[in-house]
């Protein structure tokens, strides 16, 4: 791979790495909230995985406990995949010439992560943001803000400088 293709591949891979860093920041923010308020973890990722498997006609093996554990793992892995994937899209957009400001990049990554995760959950009927309380919204937005800020900053730190 040479030339433009190599530059595009570099942008996408850097974006994926930035998405992984952002996902780590999102998880830390979520765990800090759980620690501070003593709240349980969200079950929406595992419930989403269960609905998706049911709709796809995929039987997840095991007794109730084993299946529950597998859905918890699938939910967590889908969150990681969404974060890395959103970062890859961010890198692709950059590779295609999009050059946001630091704030614009962080905002775009935040909105992309919010829509990319909450959108499917809403469409599948797992959650309904219209029924969320103010505390629910803050608990969701703050970790996604951490994702956006860290993903954009990580990408910017690794992106080649153009003068």
Image (spheres, rainbow, N blue to C red):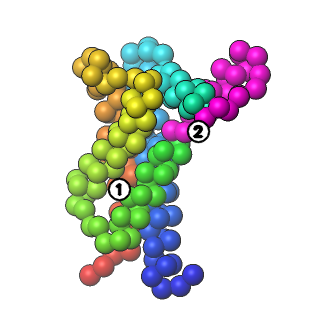
Q: Which residue is mark 1?
A: 153
Q: Quadrant of residue 142?
A: top left
Q: Quadrant of residue 160?
A: bottom left
The correct choice, above or below, for 141 with respect to 134 in the image is below
Crowd rating for badge 1 (residues with CA inside 10 Å; few <14, some 14–19, many 20+): some
Q: Which residues are magenta?
A: 56-79
**Residue 62 in magenta stretch:** yes
> Who's the residue at 53% across and 42% down the image?
80
Disc with the residue nearer the chain's start (2 vs 1): 2
151 relative to 80 in the view: left or right: left
Magenta: main secondary structure: helix
Query: Please, which residue is most extreme toward the right here?
Result: 62
Q: Which residue is mark 2?
A: 77
Residue 100 image position (x, y, % from top left): 25, 62
The quarter of the rendered structure image containing the N terminus is bottom right
Residue 66 image position (x, y, % from top left): 73, 21
Q: Is residue 151 visible?
A: yes
Q: Disc 2 vs disc 1: Cβ atoms closer than 8 Å?
A: no
Q: Is residue 31 visible?
A: no
């Amino acid at each position: 791979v040479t030339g433009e293709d190599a530059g595009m591949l570099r942008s996408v891979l850097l974006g994926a790495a930035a998405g992984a860093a952002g996902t780590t920041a999102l998880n830390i923010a979520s765990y800090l909230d759980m620690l501070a308020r003593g709240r349980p973890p969200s079950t929406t990722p595992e419930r989403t995985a269960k609905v998706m498997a049911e709709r796809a006609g995929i039987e997840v093996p095991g007794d109730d406990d084993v299946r529950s554990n597998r859905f918890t793992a699938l939910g967590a892995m889908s969150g990681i995949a969404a974060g890395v994937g959103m970062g890859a899209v961010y890198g692709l957009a950059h590779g295609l010439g999009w050059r946001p400001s630091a704030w614009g990049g962080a905002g775009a990554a935040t909105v992309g992560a919010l829509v990319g995760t909450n959108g499917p959950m809403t469409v599948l009927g797992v959650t309904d943001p219209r029924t969320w309380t103010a505390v629910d919204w803050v608990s969701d937005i703050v970790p996604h803000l951490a994702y956006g800020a860290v993903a954009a900053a990580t990408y910017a730190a690794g992106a080649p400088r153009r003068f």
